[in-house]
Image (cartoon, coloured by chain):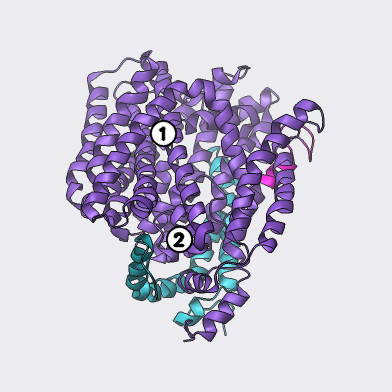
Chain colours: A cyan, B purple
Amino acid sequence: MAFFRRKWTPGEADEWTKEDYIASVLSALAYIALAVGSALSMLLMTSGFIILAIGILLSLAMYYIIDPKLRMISSEYEKRQKEYLQELAKIQRWEEIK
Amino acid sequence: MVTFHLLDWIWLIAFMVLMIGCGVIFYRLGKRSQSDFFLAGRGLPWWLPASSVYATHTATDTPIWVTGVIYKYGLAGIWYTFFAAWCAVSAFISTRIFRRSLAYTQAEWQSLRFGGLGGELLRGWVAGWQVFMNMFILGWVGMAMGKVCFFAFGWPLWVGLTSFSVVCAIYVLAAGYWGVIMADFLQGIIAFSAIVIVSVWQIVAAGGPGEIVAKLMATGEGWRLDPFAFSGWFEGDFPIAWFLTMMVIAIVGGIGMGTSMDWYVEAQRIQSAKTVRDASYSIWGGTALVLVRNSIWAVAILGFFALNPNIAEMKDYEMGWFQMAFEYLPAGMLGFFAAAILAIHLSTISTHLNLGAMYVTRDLYHHYINPQASEQKLVWVGRVATIVLLLGSFMYGLMMEKITEWLIFAIWIMAAGVWLPNILQVIWWRFNSWGYLSSWVANLSLSWLIVWVLPELGVIPKLADYQQFWLLVFLMALIYIPVTYLTKPENMDHLVRYYVMSRPIGWWGPVRAEAEKRGLLSNE
């Protein structure tokens, strides 16, 4: 079995798993690398191009890890969204919710 | 003073016509319902709210303060702009939770997370605070535009403050968030292109990247090229301790809701995205663009420093990026640059007009004053609220010089003391409305003591801002943790409903167990 899951059931995707945590860490590191790499690249420094490339790779890795899970969460949630919106409208109007 | 040629005026007028056109084209969509007027019907693909995240976070005053920190601290100054990095974590945690709640606003979310009287008090408080904040930001940004127009054309401040905001109000009034988001998309493209072109132009005018590096090295200013040039661990005005604190505030803060002032703006973008996935990518993508943009700016400002190295007063160098553009751009390009400044300005103004109006309409009028209001009536209340916010912002703008210091303090205290409670409300089921409310109330008094009163009386030394932050975090916990445990947990029915809908992260064991017992969780 692969370290990162690529197939999810709706129930599994609703849980918080290592894919979420790793994607969050990669995301923060990618931001740092993109910010520093862009600045140094604009100064035509070699280190800047390397850091920028690392930032782009980290972003792609983040996408690879989290996207299958986000797709499943989204498609499953959309099925229930209409019902939740009706509940929200009742709360807004101070009506009782069962 | 800047002189415009015919081509410059054509750029500027064409841009304004395009923006007002957004209001006319999307008028019919905007007036359909409250959901359309404030969230574009919750149906946007990720790249539209992403462009809005980018456009909104590029305000007229942004290049001014970015210039200020880069000129002073060199490339390390980019960390001052790194507060936006809360989106790195938020994109995959709090954004997902908030999108699933379907709350229009953060104020509404408070009443979904917390029940009863406490939840309603929080909703009213957050809504009122946000109406004030949006009006204040509108005044602040409007006044920045007033200064730019004074700098460029010698116009009185009030002309720049009011004239462009009125143009902006036309398309916000007509099409609501549909107008905001479509204009933001165009403005985002124009602003990003212009910032890249103008910054590259400035770098070339300063002699090019190699010349900038050589000049800095030759004058003993090579440290400015190091993004990690700090003044020591704790000593100096730019220590590593500050940097680490900022990283924690930004990155860990992404787990919570409201840990950054920008959250309230992003919350609207999150709910306007058509799916949870679109919401996540919109926040991530828009912010990545903001950070890259800041870095491009930073290098152009290093070029400004290389040409003008000995400016001592901040007021004299903070307009550096604008100054170089106006000095070095040729006729024809100036109009394009002015259109970009206008794009930057209008995107921020339109967002805060619509966002402030949403809090008035959704949280104050619809929920508390007229719960049975029709969709058409709500759209009209939204429009009236937009006008009130616009007029209020002019008043704030004209008072701004006198009250800025007080208001910066107000923003700071609103951020520091409730930073951890803003995370706890997301991750800890037992944290209740009274605990959260107590943190807000305690924050108002304790922050005055720590920041101003006690240092003034000599009871404690004057602390650096990062030290104030940690002290406030610690002291505040001594208040809201006991209050939480001394008051009852939230109603379990309310918590279960929230949990099933939002599936929050963290310590929710008892609520989850209850939801499973009731057969409300999918086990597929």
B432 and B305: which is toward the camera: B432
**Magenta segment: does it hold B295?**
no
Q: Is residue B88 above or below residue B151?
A: below
Same chain for the residues under marks 2 and 1 in the image: yes
Q: Is residue A34 visible?
A: no
**Residue B502 appears in the figure:** yes
Q: Circle 1 sits in a helix, a strand or a loop, which is it? A: helix
**Magenta-colored span:** B232-246
The three-letter amino acid code for the residue at tag 1 is Leu
Amino acid type at mark 2: Ser
Residue B313 is situated, as x and y percent measured from the top left of the image, at 61, 17
- Does residue B312 appear to the left or right of B65 in the view shown? right
Q: Quadrant of residue B356?
A: top left
Q: Is residue B302 above or below residue B83?
A: above
Nearer-the-camera pick, B440 or B106: B440
The residue carrying mark 2 is B280
Residue B62 % position (x, y): 48, 33
Percent position of residue B285, x then y: 45, 54
In the figure, B475 relative to A21: above or below?
A: above
Q: Chain of mark 1?
A: B
Residue denoted by label 1:
B138
For image coordinates 47% across by 82% down, the residue present is B520
Nearer the N terminus, badge 2 or badge 1? Answer: 1
